[in-house]
Image: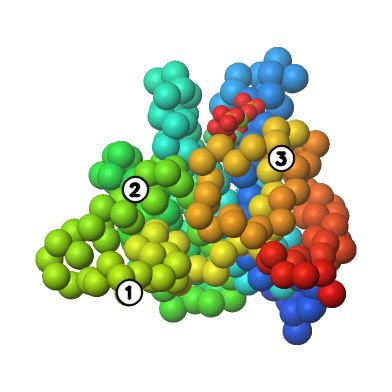
Amino acid sequence: MRTALSQAIAEAPADLSATAPRHVAIIMDGNGRWAASRHLPRVAGHREGARAVRRTIEAAMRHGVKWLTIYAFSSENWRRSAGEVLDLTGLLRQYLRTEIAELASNGVRLRFIGDRTRFDPDIQQDLTQAERGTSGNSRLNLTVALSYGARAEILAAARAMGEAVRDGKFDPDALTEEGFAQFLSTDGIPDPDLIIRTSGEQRLSNFLLWQAAYAELAFLDVLWPDFTEAHFAAAMADYSRRERRFGARPA
Ligand code: IPE
Ligand code: IPE
Ligand code: MG
């Protein structure tokens, strides 16, 4: 069966354009406002948001992006009402059960970052299984941030390092930025080149704080459920015009 995803793969460029970002990360914001503007319950926005995720994965593949990270649920989102948390975890469960097989068969490698121990055991199991079942794939590296908070991630890395030093396995004087990054949950994942946030908010909300050091930022005035391939393409075009300097003298 030719699905939208396999179609996207067929249309992917053979060579990565020199200007395409290697890693795009997205803060998918605005589901609640989308629903409110239609007098619908917030969960309707989250449901529509899941459809936008599907479109975005296809768009990333079509544009030859190899690494895509999406912020689906923050460690602070547990503070929402019990009802909304239940709706969100329910949608996650449903998404994992219905989408993983197709992603797996289309060459997507899945990773999850964040504190997964806060989810129900059946969800934790599905996450582990999805990671194991797709670990041989490399067409698109899709990382989903779930119950993720960058400060907690950095703190956990500092703690792990401290323990390694205490156990005599690590010399603190030998510590480098690359060495520290190996303690983060994103070990093995390149830093994001471009971070997109939808919904008009201009903040990172505890997303990839270490990794975002030199990311280009794009704040789009579209609510996440309305995000389409055209928005993705516009963000790619905008990125291609940016001049990245990394602190060096402009050319
Ligand atoms: C993003 O949409 C989804 C999550 C944070 C889980 P929101 O639910 O934050 O939507 P707004 O920001 O209230 O519109
Ligand atoms: C950030 O959105 C988290 C996700 C998109 C998953 P929030 O809606 O939670 O962020 P704030 O509260 O507006 O900063
Ligand atoms: Mg929000």
| Quarter that holds the N terminus | bottom right
Outermost residue on the left side: it is 167
Disc 2 residue type (three-letter): Leu
| Residue visible at 70% across and 33% down in the picture | 201
Q: Could you give the CA–CA distance between mark 1 and mark 2, rounded to whole angstroms?
A: 19 Å
Q: Determine crowd level at label 1: few under 14, some 14-19, many 20+ residues with C-alpha closer than 10 A.
A: few
Q: Which mark is residue 155?
A: 2
Disc 3 residue type (three-letter): Thr
Would you identify the image quadrant in which residue 17 lies? bottom right
Q: Position of residue 165 (x, y in %)?
A: 20, 65
How many numbered circles are shown? 3
232 and 19: which is toward the camera: 19
Q: Position of residue 84 (x, y in %)?
A: 47, 24
Disc 1 residue type (three-letter): Ala
Residue 1 as seen in the image, left or right of residue 123: right
Q: Nearer the viewer, mark 1 or mark 2?
A: 1
Q: Position of residue 176 (x, y in %)?
A: 41, 70
Residue 242 as seen in the image, left or right of residue 211: right
Q: Could you give the CA–CA distance between mark 2 and mark 3, rounded to whole angstroms?
A: 27 Å
132 and 27: which is toward the camera: 27
Residue wearing tag 1: 174
Residue wearing tag 3: 198
210 and 128: which is toward the camera: 210
Q: Secondary structure at mark 2?
A: helix
Q: Determine crowd level at label 2: few under 14, some 14-19, many 20+ residues with C-alpha closer than 10 A.
A: few
Q: Is residue 184 above or below residue 228?
A: below
Q: Secondary structure at mark 1?
A: helix
Mark closest to the chain's N terminus, 2 or 3: 2
Q: Position of residue 37 (x, y in %)?
A: 75, 19
Tell which quarter ligand 3 is in: top right
| Residue visible at 82% across and 69% down in the picture | 250
